[in-house]
Image (cartoon, rainbow, N blue to C red):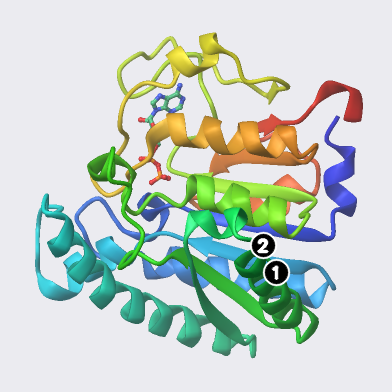
C-alpha cells in the first residue's frame, strides 16, 4: 500500500505551528533547521518540493512578546504580518546553509475559483519549481478571513495545502502535525484512542472522531485535516498525516515506512 511513496516526485509538505514553535512560545530552531535539511536533500535527489508553512502568528507573538493568541482579527492580522516576514527570514537563513533558494508565495483559498488567478498561481509555482527553488506558501492573512468562522480558521493552512497539492497535481501531501496521525478519538483526552494506519474514505464517523481544537498555537485541529484529506482523495491523490517532531520523519514516510496515517483510495494501492 505504501510502496508508491518510494517513487513520488512532486511533494507538498505542510508544517503546522506546533512543529515550529515550542509550547512555551519560543521558536523551534532545531525543527526548522532539520526541515530545511530534509527538504533540501529531497531537492538534491531531484524531487520537486513545495512547502506550506503555518507559524506566522506564533512567530509574530514571540517577536512582539505577546503571550496569548490575540482574539481580535485585526490584531491577529497585524501579528501575522510581523511574524510572516520574520518566519521567511528564518527559513531563508536555514535553507541557505544548504545552498537552497526559497521563495515566499502568499495565497488565498479562492484562487481555485477564478481561472485567471488559478492559472497565475500554477505558472508561478511551476516556474519556481523548474528553477529548483522551494516555494514556501502561506495564506495571505491580511486579505483572507473567513467571515463565518474566523477565530477557528484563521491561520489554518490545512485546506490551503490540499488546494495547492490539487492545483499542482502533487503525488503526495505530507501533513506534519504534533500528533502521530489520525486516532479513533483525541489522544489528548482519551488514552485508549487507536491510531489509524490507512484511511480510504472520509465518513461521518471519522468526522465525529476529530474532536475540537488542538494546541494553543495550532488552529485547525483534526477537522480541517480531514477536510484536506477529503479533497486529496477526491483528486485521487494521497496524503500522509504524521508527527513533525522531528521533521526527518519525512524520510521514513518516503521510504514507505508505516508511520502516521495514510489517506488513499484503496483501489489505487
Ligand atoms: P497543527 O498545529 O499541527 O495544525 P492542531 O493543534 O491544529 O495541529 O491539531 C492537532 C491536535 O488535534 C492534536 O494534538 C490532538 O490533540 C487533536 N485531535 C483531536 N482529535 C484528534 C484525533 N481523532 N486524532 C488525532 N488528534 C486529534
**Which quadrant of the rendered structure holds the C terminus?**
top right
Q: Secondary structure at mark 1?
A: helix
In this rendered view, identify the residue nearer to me: 172 or 28: 172
Picture quadrant of residue 143: bottom left
Left or right: where 169 falls relative to 38: right
In the drawing, does residue 257 fall left or right of residue 36?
right
Judge whether 47 appears above or below 235 on screen.
below
**In the image: residue 87, left or right of residue 68:** right
Q: Position of residue 64 (x, y in %)?
A: 12, 74
Sort mark 1 into few (<14), some (14-19) or many (20+) by Cα contacts within 10 Å: few
Label 2 to label 1, Cα distance in Å? 6 Å
Secondary structure under the numbered disc 2 in the rendered image:
helix
> Residue 122 placed where, x, y %?
70, 69
Q: Which mark is residue 72?
A: none
Q: List the residue tagged with mark 2.
A: 115
Label 2 environment density (alpha carbons within 10 Å; few <14, some 14–19, many ≥20):
few
**Residues at discs 2 and 1 in contact (Cβ within 8 Å):** yes
* Residue drawn at 53 percent across, 9 percent down: 205
From the top left corner, tell me how far across and down residue 181 is, in percent: 55, 31
Residue 266: % across, % down: 84, 22
Q: Determine whether, in the image, residue 98 is placed left or right of residue 223.
A: right
Residue that numbered label 1 is attached to: 119
Q: What residue is shown at x 53% (from left), y 11% (from top)?
A: 204
Rendering quadrant holding ligand 1: top left
Residue under the point 43% across and 67% down: 30
Amino acid at each position: 500500500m505504501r510502496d508508491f511513496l518510494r517513487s513520488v516526485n512532486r511533494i507538498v509538505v505542510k508544517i503546522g505551528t506546533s512543529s515550529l514553535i515550542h509550547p512555551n512560545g519560543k521558536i523551534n530552531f532545531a525543527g526548522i533547521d532539520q526541515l530545511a535539511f530534509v527538504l533540501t536533500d529531497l531537492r538534491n535527489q531531484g524531487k520537486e518540493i513545495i512547502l506550506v508553512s503555518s507559524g506566522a502568528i506564533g512567530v509574530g507573538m514571540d517577536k512582539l512578546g505577546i503571550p496569548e493568541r490575540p482574539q481580535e482579527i485585526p490584531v491577529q492580522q497585524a501579528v501575522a504580518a510581523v511574524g510572516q516576514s520574520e518566519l521567511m527570514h528564518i527559513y531563508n537563513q536555514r535553507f541557505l546553509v544548504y545552498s537552497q533558494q526559497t521563495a515566499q508565495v502568499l495565497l488565498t483559498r479562492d484562487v481555485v475559483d477564478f481561472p485567471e488567478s488559478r492559472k497565475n498561481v500554477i505558472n508561478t509555482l511551476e516556474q519556481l519549481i523548474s528553477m529548483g527553488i522551494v516555494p514556501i506558501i502561506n495564506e495571505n492573512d491580511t486579505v483572507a478571513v473567513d467571515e463565518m468562522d474566523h477565530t477557528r480558521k484563521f491561520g489554518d493552512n490545512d485546506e490551503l495545502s490540499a488546494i495547492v497539492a490539487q492545483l499542482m497535481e502533487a503525488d503526495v501531501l505530507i501533513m506534519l502535525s504534533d500528533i502521530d496521525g489520525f486516532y479513533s478519538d483525541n489522544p489528548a483526552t482519551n488514552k485508549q484512542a487507536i491510531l489509524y494506519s490507512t484511511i480510504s474514505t472520509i465518513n461521518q464517523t471519522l468526522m465525529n472522531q476529530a474532536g475540537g481544537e488542538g494546541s494553543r498555537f495550532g488552529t485547525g485541529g483534526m477537522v480541517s485535516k480531514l477536510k484536506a484529506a477529503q479533497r486529496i482523495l477526491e483528486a485521487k491523490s494521497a496524503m500522509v498525516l504524521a508527527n513533525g517532531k522531528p521533521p526527518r520523519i519525512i524520510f521514513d514516510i518516503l521510504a514507505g515506512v508505516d508511520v502516521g496515517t495514510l489517506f488513499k483510495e484503496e483501489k489505487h494501492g
